[in-house]
Image (tube, rainbow, N blue to C red):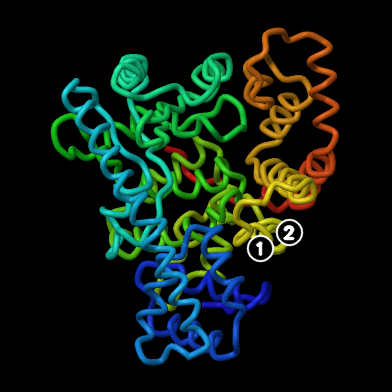
Amino acid sequence: MGFLDRGTPEERLVIYAARDEPAAETLQRVHELLQRGVDGDRLVDICRRTKTWTMVLETFRALDGDLPASAQGSLAKLERLKRSVWYPHLLVLSKTRQTVRTLLRERGLPFTFIRGLNFAERYYRHPHNRISGDLDVLLPENVWREAEALFIASGFAQGEPERVAEARRMYMGQVELLHRQSRVSLDLNWRMTGNAGIGDVCVDMDEMWKRAIPAGDSELSLSPADCLWDLVRHVGHGHDFGRGGLIVRACADVNALMRKASDEVDWEYLRYQARKGRFVRIWAFFSHFYDSRYCETGDVRLADCVPEARQRSTAPERELFFGSIIGPRAVAGISNGNARNVFIHTNLALLAKLWGVDTFAGLVGILRGLLWPSEWEWRLLTSSAAPGFGLPQRMRFWADLSMALPGILAGSLMRLAWGILWAPAVLCRPRQKTR
């Protein structure tokens, strides 16, 4: 496991300690960092922002008597955080999940939970150490309207104004609901790449449902391959390698799945879905961070499993992407909302999205959507529920968009520059077999 060459001791400590089953080498590195001394308050703050405090806490406990005295204060704070924040939320989340499961099973609607609690229970050795914020349900496209009506009639409310929700349904294949009593958010999805923000792109949903595994009544579980690529796509396309410190938690998820079910992953099928969903370059950038900064000795390297990812990018580009985007965003967590942080994270998100897009046609499509959005796109980009979509509204949108110009320009230039620079080498490579 390559030692992180950037970041503060607290940041490196979180990246090493945030995993379900740390090996002896990881415990040794954590112990060395703790002995050198860390800022306990800063460490706890990073754990909280990245939602990894439960895993870091268990890694500290695994040190037993080797935990330095200076880290005892951090251990106590993490324990209080787990008892006062995570356990109460876990109880509410579990009850709401049971409500969702009962409603869908009784109606006989096929569905599966994606990521979150169900993933942790399936792949983690210590599932309660994987923090989850909300519930994500995937349904076939032909039943989502019935499912939404069922939940609305059973204690859930729409989480957005109707005009925005309508755009999310039509453009993204998703609807956000909120349980009125528990206040738990429920996302209904019927297109796995709907929230990528890269245009009308979707994986082969029919093939995905064919591979789903029965889990009781009408409930299903995704195949290991579908679970794996969804984790990488979600953090890359869905959240542009940021927002809430999702990168580190995604690494922990991938690590848990690979240790338990790597032999069950159909890699040829996964590569097919990566091409279909246009997240091959996302896989390349994520796997570079995972393989070189997170993996332990003996872990399967993701880049070796999807050779197309290396052919869509180069080692210098992957390292530059890490230094420019993944490194700064890995432990950034949720910004405190001041203008400077909003500006930085907005531009980094756009830089990541444009730089990571698979094709030049996709790049042009994103730029078109930003500069001249359709009404659906405009509603989603602005979260506006106000009627009207004329020139005055567009002008206000362009004025707001001006703060994101650095990210738009930098992302476009990086994608074009690296694509043109390495085009001859890519064209000379033998083509991969297609499915």
Viewer-proximal residue among 65 and 169: 65
Residue 301 locus on image (x, y percent): 46, 65
Viewer-proximal residue among 201 and 109: 109
Name the residue: 79% across, 44% down: 407
Residue 401 locus on image (x, y percent): 80, 31
The residue pinned by badge 1 equals 327
Give amino acid for label 2: Ser
Instruction: Please tell me how crowded label 2 is: few (under 14), some (14-19), or many (20+) other residues with Cα within 10 Å.
Output: some
Horizontally, is 127 left or right of 379 in the view? left
Residue 183 locus on image (x, y percent): 41, 35
Name the residue: 72% across, 42% down: 350
Snapshot quadrant of residue 4? bottom right
Horizontally, is 76 left or right of 321 in the view? left
Residue 89 locus on image (x, y percent): 37, 49
- Marks 1 and 2, how far apart at CA: 7 Å
- Contact between marks 1 and 2 (CB within 8 A): the answer is yes
Q: In terms of secondary structure, where does tag 2 sit?
A: helix
The residue pinned by badge 2 equals 324
